[in-house]
Every structure is written in C-alpha cells, then in structure tokens.
Image (spheres, rainbow, N blue to C red):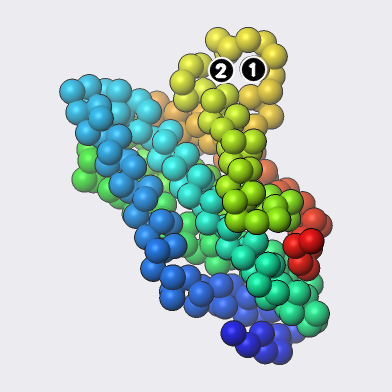
Amino acid sequence: MSTGTFPPGPARTLATAARVLRQLRHDPRTVALLLLVPALMITLLRYVFDGSPGTFDTVGASLLGVFPLITMFLVTSIATLRERTSGTLERLLAMPLGKADLIAGYALAFGAVAVVQSLLATALSVWVLGLDVVGSPWLLLLVALLDALLGTALGLFVSAFAASEFQAVQFMPAVIFPQLLLCGLFTPRDRMHPVLEAVSNVLPMSYAVDGMNQVLGHRGVTADFCRDVLVVAGSAVLVLCLGAATLRRRTA
C-alpha cells in the first residue's frame, strides 16, 4: 500500500480515515466481526430470555452498548498493532503526518463503522427483537454509539503497550472485564461494597449503563442523562489524547 503524500491540515486526517476504510473493505472477516457479531449476540440474548421477556428488556439495552464496545476495542487494538508491526506506522510517521492526525484518522474511520454498527444493532433490537424501550430509541442509539467510540479509543490506546496481537487480546481482562463487572449490569452499584462502588464511579462503562437505564425509564434528556453522555464522550476524547501521546512508530 502506498502511503503517498498527505495534504496539509485536516485533509491528513481524512486521508488516513479513507485508507483505513479501504483496508476494512478488503477484510470481510473484520467487517463481519464489527457489524454482525453485536447483532448476533443481541439476538442470542433475546432467545436466552425467551421465557422471560421482561429480563431481556431490563438487560438488553445495557448490553446493546456493551457488545459494540467490546468488538470495537478488539478490532481497533489489533488493527493498529498490525499497522505498527508491519512497518506501516513507521512509514506514515516519517512523513509530515502528526500523531494526532493519525489517531484522529483511525478514530474517524472506526467511528464511521461504529455508526453503522450501532444503527444495525439498535434497529434489530427495537424493531425486530421487540426490545421494549419506553424512551426514545434515538437516545438509545446515541449511548450505543458513544460506547462503540469509547471502545475504539480504548483499543487505540492499549495497542501502544502490546507487542503482539495476542498481547492486545490479553488487555481485555484488564481493561474491559472490570468495567463489565462493576458497571451495574449485574447488581446496582449502590449495593456493592463501598470500595467497589467508588471504583465504579470513575469507570466510563458505568455511566453508559446508567444512560441506557435513563432511556428505559423514559426519563428523557434529564440532567443525569446529559451527565452520563458527557462522561462517556469525555472519556473517549481523553483516551484518544492519551493514545496520541503514547503512540509509537514500531513495536520493540
């Protein structure tokens, strides 16, 4: 693949995003993982709780945000690491392309995929699988999209600390699983041990689940919902900035 000469300004970010999207277009397995796996997992969950549809309504919306986060984290971390180990990152950064331009390009490309992923999963859940959402499905989509973008940001960040694709996958128990256990999905956070509750209060997935619950409770765009959305979005931006600061040209 030719890295070419990048145009000045924001066009560098757009050129990077276009290159990543072209790569994804020629990788049907990755596209299937990004677009189909969350939808398949939601469908499986629906029929696991076939005899208890109320349970699906309770946890389905929360997992609608969790599944995209996990898949975007996995694919983004592995794809970025593959670019570094193949030498593509080194060649790109040798050109007049800043780390921020590169990270923003990756975020834009995977963010575009996240939009499609969230639309597909949300439409399937609400209009095919019968997820009972009292509030606006568009608010549900917003939180699902922000979750997917957060997964992208986390994947870009942890890829800087992995030396192989296997190591990138190993970061999941450290980065994703604690958030999954403490986000309030399995038990209300205020019923946890005080130390665990305090930890959950600084984890972005907790606010994603709270935002989903706001939609399910038909509370609309309340102050709490805005707080939850801003925390998830702010966490994604912060992690992207950290990813740009820690990005390395090559894997040692």
239 sits to left or right of 116: right
Residue nearest the observer in this picture, 154 or 8 = 154
Using the numbered discs, state the Cα–Cα distance from disc 2 to disc 1 in whole angstroms.
Answer: 6 Å
Residue carrying label 2: 189
Kind of element beneath mark 2: helix
Which residue is found at the position 64% from the left and 17% from the top?
A: 197
User: Split into 4 quadrants, where in the image is the N terminus?
Assistant: bottom right
User: Split into 4 quadrants, where in the image is the C terminus?
Assistant: bottom right
Numbered tag placed on residue 197 in the rendering: 1
In this view, 68 is above or below 179: below
Tell me where residue 130 appears, x and y as whole percent: 22, 38
139 sits to left or right of 82: left
Kind of element beneath mark 1: helix
**Image quadrant assignment for residue 213:** top left
In this view, 81 is above or below 132: below
**Image quadrant assignment for residue 48:** top left
Q: Of label 2 and label 1, which has the lower sequence position? A: 2
